[in-house]
Image (cartoon, rainbow, N blue to C red):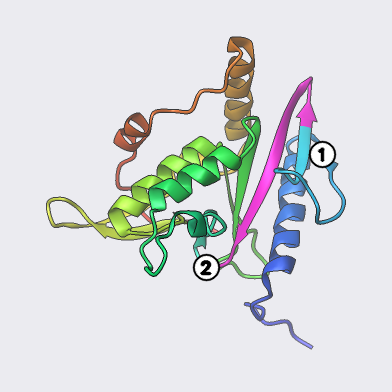
Amino acid sequence: MTLPTSPAKPSTWPIAIGAESIAAAQFARCGFDVMMQVGRDKPWYDFAVGRAGNMLKVSVKASDDGRWNLVQGFTRRVSEPGTRALDCRTAIDFWADSQGSKTICCLVQFEDVAITQMPRIYLAYPAEIAAEMRLASERAACCGLLERYEYTSTEGKHEFASLPTNWRFSPERIQDLIDRQSASVISGSFPKPSVAVVAAAVQARPVALTA
């Protein structure tokens, strides 16, 4: 029996379990001790990783269609009765505020990934993700996090954008997140970046990705 190159699309739960295991394995390959949680009833993170006295709590978000519907559970709070209009910005704020200040998100993307390949993995703080979602909601009227998308600029040109390349999983990205968390601990606060500052720094990015 020959396995297909692209297996039949599984349900959400197996994808989430697979993404969590893959993410944990990647952290272990980078020399981290991985402390997994058991069962479905977990707090706001899936597992913790530690090395040399540093620890990160990791919340894994899986997707197989190029987007992460992170605010899906929050849109009902801000929709007006009798309408389909959703206040994406408020929903995004609800989502960001619900995340632990010391937690990072591990975004695992299976779209167009063959069974013999690794999924694309990104690491970011919730505040960074919220800034990207706000920008996408303004550009593409999307209430979610998009890996890549097309939009029309204010000059009327068709542009493309994708997640920041420095979010890609790597030892350097992990160290950057650890350093920023350590700096926040020393200062005694975990400040959220200004949306205006983050949005101004985000430019249209090429969509070419390698699996």
Amino acid type for the residue under numbered disc 1: Val
Give the farthest residue toward the right.
Answer: 38
- Residue 202 figure quarter: top left
Residue at left 51%, top 23%?
Answer: 191
Give the farthest residue toward the left.
Answer: 155
- Residue 15 figure quarter: bottom right
Amino acid type for the residue under numbered disc 2: Asp
Label pair 1/2, CB-CB below 8 angstroms: no
Q: Where residue 38 appears, x then y in whole percent?
A: 87, 51
Q: Where residue 64 appears, x then y in whole percent?
A: 58, 66
Q: Which residue is mark 1?
A: 34
Q: Which residues are magenta?
A: 50-65
Q: Main secondary structure of the magenta part?
A: strand
Residue at left 16%, top 57%?
Answer: 157
Q: What distance separates the C-alpha of mark 1 from that of mark 2?
A: 28 Å
Q: Give the left or right position of residue 158, taking residue 7 as reference.
A: left
Which labelled disc corresponds to residue 65? 2
Q: Which is nearer the eye, 25 or 116?
A: 25
Give yes or no for residue 61 being in the magenta stretch. yes
Q: Where residue 163 appears, x then y in whole percent?
A: 44, 48
In the picture, the quarter occupied by the N terminus is: bottom right
Q: Is 94 located above or below residue 78 in the figure?
A: above
Residue at left 73%, top 41%?
Answer: 27
- First in sequence: mark 1 vs mark 2: 1
Badge 2 marks a residue whose secondary structure is loop
Q: Is 15 located above or below residue 120 in the figure?
A: below
Instruction: Determine crowd level at label 2: few under 14, some 14-19, many 20+ residues with C-alpha closer than 10 A.
Output: few
Give yes or no for residue 17 being in the magenta stretch. no
